[in-house]
């Protein structure tokens, strides 16, 4: 279980002074789902000596002598169990935006920096959210149903122009969501750990402890926050009851941010008008779950960020950061192990 720390240790470390720049001098272990490795593995091998791991046993064997750990499959139990075998590890990179499953105590307590894949999925997720907003506004789910039933059912639909979008989690992904929805004519505000004023994306960003005050005014509430101890089960019956009855709830963050039973109850009672869900407390969602049969729910299989070529893009991003690490430069997308996410667009500002 992740614990909060008063401070983060240094977020960048240079290779040892006696380390050469040839590929054999850097040892990268890739923790994946199987022994095939990620797309683009050949390009990583051109830059480093690569070992593959896919379970606790293979990871224990690979970690000794490893400088860099690239995690493409979050088998947290395997990593935590094998952690004592890491004798010279200097950097962990997560090939995802979320790092909540990596934040076990031994890693958090160490001075080993963690980076993530912030930025890779932002645009695709923003397009997903705008698409969900438009599907609700234009009643697209019923259009498909009426087409399948060969029914001609004319009705008026909503416009999104001027509608209030509240983005809960005003980080990299949240800003991209806000930017795209603002371009479509929506009014955009955000929720973050600390309040801040207006900028080119947000009319205003409210502090997290003000969430309940602003939920009633939103037409669409989008969860783009990371999963932390503070956000786990953040959206419960009380918060759904605070939302406007016509509001729609969209979750592209983490499933555990929502109390699922409370969401189902809110959808059934009319506390909220609908939900678009890409993430769930239990994945895959069990076939018998009530959400499957709900007419006011749009669902997808944790794929909002995945675009054609995303795995190669993750390799590109890792190699970019690897070049920085080898040169002793500051890594981008450094995760605050206290807070569980990488604050700000670090690559753009590096």
Image: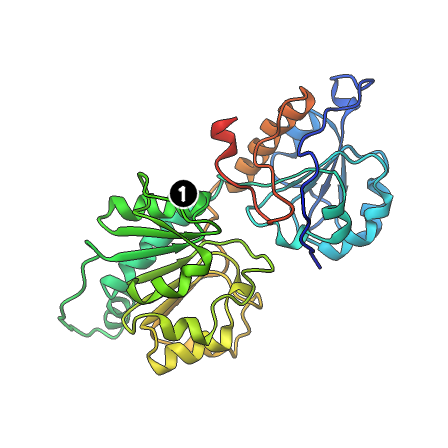
Residue under the point 72% across and 24% down: 14
> Observer-nearest residue: 79 or 182?
182
State which quadrant residue 24 falls in.
top right
> Observer-nearest residue: 210 or 52?
210
> Observer-nearest residue: 49 or 166?
166
Q: Mark 1 falls on what kind of element? A: helix
Mark 1, Cα crowd under 10 Å, few <14 / some 14-19 / many 20+, is: many
Q: Is residue 313 left or right of residue 154?
A: right
Q: Is residue 58 left or right of residue 272?
A: right
Q: Is residue 147 left or right of residue 103?
A: left
Query: From the viewer's perspective, is residue 256 above or below residue 335?
Result: below
On the question of residue 331 being in view, the answer is yes
Q: Where is residue 319 shown, x and y percent of the image?
A: 61, 29
Residue under the point 24% across and 51% down: 186
On the question of residue 55 being in view, the answer is no
Residue identified by numbered label 1: 123
Residue lying farthest to the bottom in this orientation: 269
Residue under the point 67% across and 19% down: 327
State which quadrant residue 222 falls in.
bottom left
Query: From the viewer's perspective, is residue 101 above or below residue 342?
Result: below
> Observer-nearest residue: 137 or 311?
137
Residue under the point 52% across and 33% down: 346
Q: Is residue 229 left or right of residue 135?
A: right
Query: From the viewer's perspective, is residue 90 above or below residue 101?
Result: above
State which quadrant residue 93 falls in.
top right
């Amino acid at each position: 279980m992740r614990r909060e720390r008063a401070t983060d240790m240094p977020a960048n470390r240079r290779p040892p002074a006696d380390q050469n720049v040839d590929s054999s001098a850097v040892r990268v272990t890739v923790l994946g789902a199987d022994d095939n490795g990620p797309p683009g593995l050949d390009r990583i091998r051109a830059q480093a000596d690569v070992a593959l791991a896919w379970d606790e046993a293979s990871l224990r064997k690979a970690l000794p002598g490893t400088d860099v750990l690239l995690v493409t499959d979050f088998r947290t139990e395997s990593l935590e169990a094998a952690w004592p075998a890491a004798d010279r590890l200097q950097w962990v990179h997560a090939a995802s935006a979320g790092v909540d499953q990596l934040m076990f105590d031994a890693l958090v307590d160490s001075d080993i920096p963690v980076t993530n894949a912030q930025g890779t999925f932002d645009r695709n997720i923003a397009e997903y959210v705008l698409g969900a907003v438009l599907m609700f506004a234009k009643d697209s789910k019923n259009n498909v149903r009426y087409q399948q039933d060969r029914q001609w059912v004319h009705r008026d639909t909503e416009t999104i122009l001027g509608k209030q979008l509240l983005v809960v989690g005003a980080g990299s992904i949240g800003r991209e969501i806000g930017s795209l929805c603002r371009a479509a004519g929506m009014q955009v505000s955000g929720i973050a750990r600390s309040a801040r004023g207006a900028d080119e994306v947000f009319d205003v960003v409210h502090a997290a402890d003000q969430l309940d005050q602003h939920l009633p005014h939103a037409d669409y509430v989008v969860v783009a926050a990371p999963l932390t101890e503070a956000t786990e089960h953040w959206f419960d019956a009380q918060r759904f009851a605070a939302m406007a009855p016509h509001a729609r709830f969209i979750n592209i963050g983490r499933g555990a941010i929502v109390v699922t039973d409370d969401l189902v109850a809110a959808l059934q009672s009319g506390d909220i008008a609908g939900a678009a869900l890409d993430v769930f407390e239990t994945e895959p969602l069990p076939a018998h779950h009530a959400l499957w049969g709900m007419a006011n729910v749009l669902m997808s299989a944790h794929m909002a960020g995945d675009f054609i070529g995303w795995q190669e893009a993750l390799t590109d991003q890792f190699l970019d950061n690897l070049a920085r690490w080898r040169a002793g430069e500051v890594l981008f997308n450094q995760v605050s192990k206290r807070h569980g996410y990488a604050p700000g667009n670090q690559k753009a500002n590096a």
